[in-house]
Image (cartoon, grey):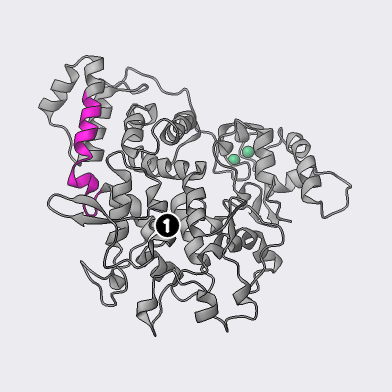
């Protein structure tokens, strides 16, 4: 059986495990796909309340799991030569022999005349900052001048160059670095684009989405606005400038029902499209802004008595219910957001009270009973605006936002060795920096992950 409490119990048992820093292990830690277990999950299952009648209740399961986990600590379930316990501690997967702890302590300094290869090297960071934020390598003369500075002056110069380069078109302009970060969230399709660079079937202008995303990332603005903004953003070019607007001719949701890019014309037309219950829009927002991919069994918070299957898709079948007990209540708050209507295009991409009753009454016998209230992270939310606020204020949002930059700038998702610096960075982003990406970036370029060659 799929047991959503498992991740939480694991993390209470091993609170310093990298898989638990601000998140929980995915179901795939123990399962191929729930309910089928992988080799590690099978080992745990054999130690789980042996002899007790099955299925175990969630409470009995949660009570028995720590003992079962401890019983398999010394095993090497995937045969990669590393015990399960060491894999918990190092953040590698105990059921994947390709996932093993990286060799550490093998770094021997002093063999590279150019850089200090084991520790933070300001000259290396300087070169990276210019490349990553300005798109240019420093000249030889610039490098010589930088090397001649004192350590304090070098740090100040790095901060100044970061601030200078984030003004560049390379960073903030059309198709620049920030736009690249937005691609997986917006998922542009050229043939469906309206406005500038119009495609063959112009349905919506997703450059509005890029503009709001970029605005929220820049100039000490609040990064959460990408999910919660009641305003829009207009982009001017040469040089690129982003300006707040209360309305745009290409956006139609009334102010009370707006939730940043989640309710943009493009999101509603492309992700809701023709569906009565917009699961795709919900799972895309969950993945894009909160970092959880339900298709990979991430971020499951099953709600009791769900899914209710209001649209009669058969999602109560056991193989479906494991994910849909999370996904369906995540989707209910989208019930009044209209996607694409071909018969009445001027009703598209709007909030329409009683949308299901008006446009989808025949989809299924119980469709109109679909509530607008739903759940995010197991917490009740009354509508999509509250959904977006709860999401934006979650650790998951801060982790996902900083992970985007970590991947762009460090070059990969945080490794177990980088975990401590990563956690400190997203916590400061959320707390000290009040969701200013600009200020978070000043932290990030100071990390060893970024500045050690
Ligand atoms: Ca192993
Ligand atoms: Ca392994």
**Secondary structure of residue under mark 1:** loop
Which residue occupies 38% across, 33% down? 433
- Give the magenta-colored segment's residue range: 157-176
Which residue occupies 44% across, 36% down? 430
Q: Is residue 281 left or right of residue 134?
A: right
Q: Which residue is mark 1?
A: 259
Q: Is residue 8 left or right of residue 108?
A: right
Which residue occupies 13% across, 49% down? 239
> How many C-alpha atoms fall within 10 Å of the one at disc 1: few (<14), some, or many (≥20)?
many
Specify the quadrant that holds the N terminus. Answer: bottom right
Pick the front one: 395 or 44: 395
Pick the front one: 317 or 418: 317
Give residue 305's quadrant in the image.
bottom right
Residue 220 location (% of width, % of height)? 31, 38
Query: Majority secondary structure of the magenta segment?
Result: helix
Q: Is residue 311 visible?
A: no
Residue 435 location (% of width, % of height)? 39, 39
């Amino acid at each position: 059986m799929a047991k959503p409490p498992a991740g939480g119990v694991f993390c209470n048992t091993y609170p310093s495990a990298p898989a638990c820093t601000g998140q929980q292990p995915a179901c795939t830690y123990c399962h191929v796909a729930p309910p089928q277990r992988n080799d590690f999950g099978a080992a745990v299952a054999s130690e789980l309340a042996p002899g007790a009648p099955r299925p175990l209740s969630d409470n009995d399961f949660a009570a028995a799991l720590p003992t079962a986990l401890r019983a398999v600590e010394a095993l090497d379930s995937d045969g990669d030569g590393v015990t399960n316990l060491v894999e918990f501690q190092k953040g590698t997967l105990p059921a994947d022999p390709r996932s093993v702890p990286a060799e550490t302590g093998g770094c021997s300094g002093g063999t590279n005349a150019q850089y200090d290869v084991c520790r933070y090297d300001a000259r290396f960071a300087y070169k990276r900052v210019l490349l990553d934020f300005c798109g240019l390598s420093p000249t030889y003369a610039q490098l010589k001048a930088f090397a001649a500075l004192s350590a304090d002056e070098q740090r100040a110069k790095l901060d100044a160059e970061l601030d200078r380069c984030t003004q560049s078109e390379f960073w903030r302009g059309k198709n620049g670095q920030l736009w690249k970060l937005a691609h997986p969230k917006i998922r542009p399709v050229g043939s469906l684009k309206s406005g500038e660079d119009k495609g063959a079937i112009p349905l919506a202008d997703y450059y509005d989405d890029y503009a709001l995303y970029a605005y929220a990332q820049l100039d000490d603005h609040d990064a959460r606005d990408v999910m919660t903004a009641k305003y829009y953003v207009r982009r001017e070019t040469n040089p690129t400038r982003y300006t707040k607007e209360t309305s745009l001719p290409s956006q139609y949701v009334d102010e009370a029902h707006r939730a940043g890019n989640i309710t943009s014309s493009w999101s509603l037309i492309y992700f809701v499209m023709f569906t009565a219950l917009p699961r795709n829009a919900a799972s895309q927002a969950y993945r894009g802004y909160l970092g959880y991919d339900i298709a990979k069994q991430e971020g499951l918070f099953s709600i009791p008595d769900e899914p209710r299957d209001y649209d009669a898709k058969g999602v109560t079948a056991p193989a479906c219910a494991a994910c849909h007990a999370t996904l369906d209540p995540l989707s209910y708050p989208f019930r009044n957001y209209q996607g694409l209507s071909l018969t009445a295009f001027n009703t598209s991409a709007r909030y329409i009270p009683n949308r299901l009753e008006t446009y989808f009454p025949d989809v299924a016998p119980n469709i109109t009973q679909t509530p607008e209230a739903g759940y995010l992270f197991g917490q009740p939310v009354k509508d999509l605006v509250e959904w977006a606020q709860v999401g934006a204020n979650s650790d998951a949002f801060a982790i996902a936002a900083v992970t985007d930059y970590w991947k762009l700038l460090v070059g990969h998702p945080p490794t177990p060795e980088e975990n401590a610096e990563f956690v400190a960075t997203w916590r400061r982003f959320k707390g000290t920096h009040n969701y200013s990406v600009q200020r978070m970036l000043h932290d990030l370029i100071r990390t060893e992950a970024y500045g050690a060659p």
